[in-house]
Amino acid sequence: MEQSENIYSAPDPFGDDPMFEYPDYPEMDDKFVIPQHYERYSDDDHKVWQELFARQEEVLEHRGCKAYRDALAAMDLPHDAIPRFEDTTALLKERTNWEIVAVPGLIPNTAFFDHLANRRFPVTHWMRKREEMDYLEEPDVFHDFYGHVPLLMQPEFADYMQLYGKAGAKAMRMDALPNLSRLYWYTVEFGLIREEGQLRIYGAGILSSKKESIYSLESDVPNRVAFDIERIMRSDYRIDDVQDTYFVIDSFEQLLKETRDTDFAPIYERVVGTSTHAANARLDSDVVIPPNAA
Ligand code: HBI
Ligand code: FE
């Protein structure tokens, strides 16, 4: 696969061509699903998991949102080894009817949306190398699993993820994929939530990064703005560094309800083809939220 600048940067990394080239993995099915092949992880792959896990345990103790912390505890993941996807699927199935499938990495948008719409979360099977502990151009198993999977245990967030998958087809029809992708970016990847007057993290891109876990909550530099779907759909984002702006929800109920109650079509009609707000823009209409005390 041609390396894009960032996995999420191209709204459609594989173009509109139905004959896109995708590396031919043996055993891959028509939904880009492969076996995890647990036995193929090296000792060092497991050690990298262990180090990243231990590091985030400490950083997220008072920074990860409650639903994330509780879910991580309930999932009872191994600290010293990459999890077996089937073990977690068994628990997820029971709790929120989600499952995990292994994929080779980034998959085409249509397949990605189809998985989410059917409550399957695609998790990249491979582990980053030690030389890339902190910066990755593509999601790996630590980002996808440690960052994304625990919150699938939270009922409203679990429904929100499915809703996002179902929204894909209409966005593609209306040329609004970049706009819908920004919603994913600013919530699922880089979302913050307010709990008991404090900011906490729920976005997987933050949860899987030590630096951004601290920065997103405590730095004076970035903007923190109350959740606003249309504002998000109009806003560019950074792919090369920590975010300039974070959007803050008050609850997962709010995230799900506002998304479910909003017809995206009129928003797409207003925003597609119009100019966007820079990633670091501050608007008069923004409801600004202060950082936590460091
Ligand atoms: N594939 N495995 C994987 N993970 C993603 O997060 C992902 C993807 N394909 C497309 C994609 N994300 C985004 O471009 C969509 O949200 C639009
Ligand atoms: Fe991600």
Image: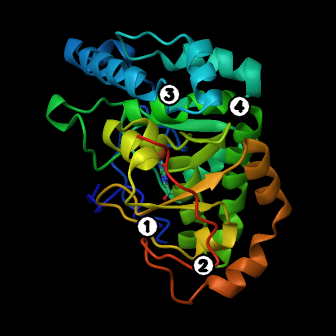
Quarter location, residue 93: top right
Q: CA distance from mark 4 to mark 2?
A: 31 Å
Q: Of helix, strand and loop, which one carries label 3?
A: loop
- Cβ atoms under marks 1 and 2 closer than 8 Å: no
The three-letter code of the residue at mark 4 reads: Gln
Instruction: Tell me, for residue 237, which label it has, or none.
Output: 1
Colour option used: rainbow
Q: Of helix, strand and loop, which one carries label 2?
A: loop
Which residue corresponds to mark 2?
A: 175
Q: Residue furthest bottom?
A: 274
Which residue corresponds to mark 3?
A: 62
Q: Is residue 151 left or right of residue 50?
A: right
The reply to whether residue 217 is in sight is yes
Say above or below: 33 vs 233: above
Residue 216 at x, y percent in the picture:
43, 48
Q: Nearer the viewer, mark 4 or mark 2?
A: 4
Q: Nearer the viewer, residue 144 or 2?
A: 144
Q: Nearer the viewer, mark 2 or mark 3?
A: 3
Q: CA distance from mark 1 to mark 3?
A: 26 Å
